[in-house]
Structures are given as C-alpha cells and as structure tokens.
Amino acid sequence: MHELSIAMSIIEIAEENAKNANTSVISEIELEIGTQAGVVMDALTFAIEAAKKGTMLEGAKWVINEVPAIARCADCKHEFPTPDLFSPCPKCGNPFSDVFQGRELRVKSLKAE
Ligand SMILES: [Zn+2]
C-alpha cells in the first residue's frame, strides 16, 4: 500500500528530527498534503493509525492540512484552482498549465513535550 509507506517515512522523518532535538516524545505533528500529491486522504489516515504504534508519534496529535491545487497557465500566466492536472486555463483556454501548488507532501511542524 502506497499510503502506508508514506506514513512510515513521515514517522521516520519526525523521529529523526526529535532525536536531533534530544526529545523522545512528540506531542503534535502537522502535515501539509496537496490535493494533487497522489495520496488518498482516508487511506493515509488509516495507514498513520497503523504505522504510529510503538513510535514517538503514537500519542501525538496529527494535524493534516490539505493544500488545494493551483495551476499557472503556461501562456497567459493566469493562476487558477484546478481539480486535476488537465484543466485548461479558464481565461484563455490554453490546455498547458503548471501545477505549482498542491503537490506538497511534507511535515510542516513538530511539537515536542
Ligand atoms: Zn491562460
């Protein structure tokens, strides 16, 4: 399962950060996940529940922020929210656009006790 490996690498990153900061308990973790990051949110939440057991993040509060996808038209540079990667520019109809926001998949912040 794709989401399980994502959940595990998130936990790995968080634990590494905590170790570097000399803490052993993480009280809160905040994630930023773009709607175009290729992650099924329900599956990820489920995967996190399974993966966090026995880790520093077991008792942590998980905050997941969904970042909406925004594309920039390759032609007129108009920026527009896009539900997928293939929507034409609503201003000039150009089918080529660059999704510059909404593909994030990162740990935004960690709080330690
Ligand atoms: Zn355009």
Image (tube, rainbow, N blue to C red):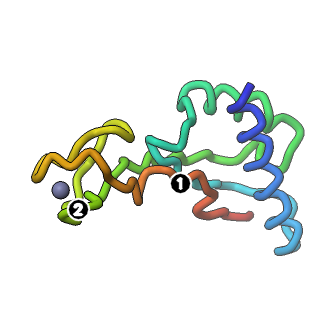
At mark 1, the secondary structure is loop
Quadrant housing the N terminus? top right
Left or right: residue 108 compared with residue 23: left
Q: Determine the image quadrant of residue 85.
A: top left
Q: Are marks 1 and 2 in contact (CB under 8 Å)?
A: no
Find disc 2 in the rendering and name its residue: 75
Whichever of labels 1 and 2 marks the residue nearer the N terminus, that label is 2
Find disc 1 in the rendering and name its residue: 104
Please tell me which residue is depicted at 27% across the width and 39% down the height of the picture: 87
Q: Is residue 54 above or below residue 20?
A: above
Amino acid type for the residue under numbered disc 1: Glu
At mark 2, the secondary structure is loop
- Residue 26: percent from left, percent from top: 75, 57
Please tell me which residue is depicted at 21% across the width and 49% down the height of the picture: 94
The residue carrying mark 2 has its beta carbon less than 8 Å from ligand 1: yes
Amino acid type for the residue under numbered disc 2: Asp
- Quadrant of ligand 1 in image: bottom left
Left or right: residue 60 compared with residue 102: right
- Residue 49: percent from left, percent from top: 71, 30
